[in-house]
Image: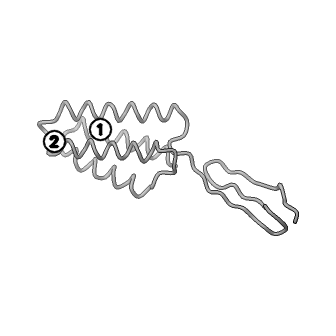
Amino acid sequence: MTGSGDYSVRAGGDITGSAFGQGGSARVNYQVGVGASGDTQELQRRLGELDDLLTRYVAALPDVQQLRDLAGELGTQLQSGRPPNRTVVRSLLTSLTAGAGGVNAVLAAVNGIGQLVSRLLN
């Protein structure tokens, strides 16, 4: 059996090529969660700001603990080192937006996180 060393690499996508014999192929799909450490730090900073706002506006929000849980799950999805589940991420952002209610500062923070996440996932 002969193998081939002809591989192509596309960032954030697939590594394809031949392996283990004539006509054999290997395909590995990979995606780096949030990516560069600067992006990770920015996400952590924004999630921390959201947590501070949740503390500040606790009396105006119906379920602060649920919002903290949602924000924690969002951070886990994006920083786990595995590709994030985009459907789950969108659902978490939608739930955070709904939970922010009429508290503009919290809503603005959630929207900012959503914009960062959109940039990171595209």
Dot 2, how many residues are within 10 Å of its Cα: few (below 14), some (14-19), or many (20+)?
Answer: some
Check whether the beta carbons of the residues at disc 2 and disc 1 lie within 8 A of each other: no
Residue at the spot x=75%, y=54% of the render? 8
Residue furthest to the front in view is 1
Residue 49 placement (x, y as % from top left): 31, 31
Q: Is residue 83 left or right of residue 9?
A: left
The residue nearer to you, when weighing 86 against 23, is 23
Residue bearing mark 1: 108
Secondary structure type for disc 1? helix
Residue 79 placement (x, y as % from top left): 46, 42
Residue furthest to the right in view is 2
Residue 64 placement (x, y as % from top left): 19, 41
* Kind of residue at disc 1: Ala
Dot 1, how many residues are within 10 Å of its Cα: few (below 14), some (14-19), or many (20+)?
Answer: some
Residue at the spot x=36%, y=39% of the render? 112
**Which one is earlier in the sequence, the residue at label 2 or at label 1?**
2
Number of residue marks: 2
Q: Is residue 78 left or right of residue 95?
A: right
Residue 1 placement (x, y as % from top left): 87, 66
Q: Tell me how the rendering is colored.
A: one colour
From what the image shows, is residue 63 above or below residue 19? Answer: above
Residue at the spot x=28%, y=45% of the render? 69
Q: Is residue 15 left or right of residue 118?
A: right
Residue furthest to the left in view is 59
Which of discs 2 and 1 lies nearer the camera? The answer is 2
Q: Which mark is residue 61?
A: 2
Q: Which mark is residue 34?
A: none
The residue nearer to you, when weighing 11 against 104, is 11
Real-space Cα separation, disc 2 to disc 1, in angstroms = 14 Å
Residue at the spot x=65%, y=47% of the render? 11
Secondary structure type for disc 2? loop
* Kind of residue at disc 2: Leu
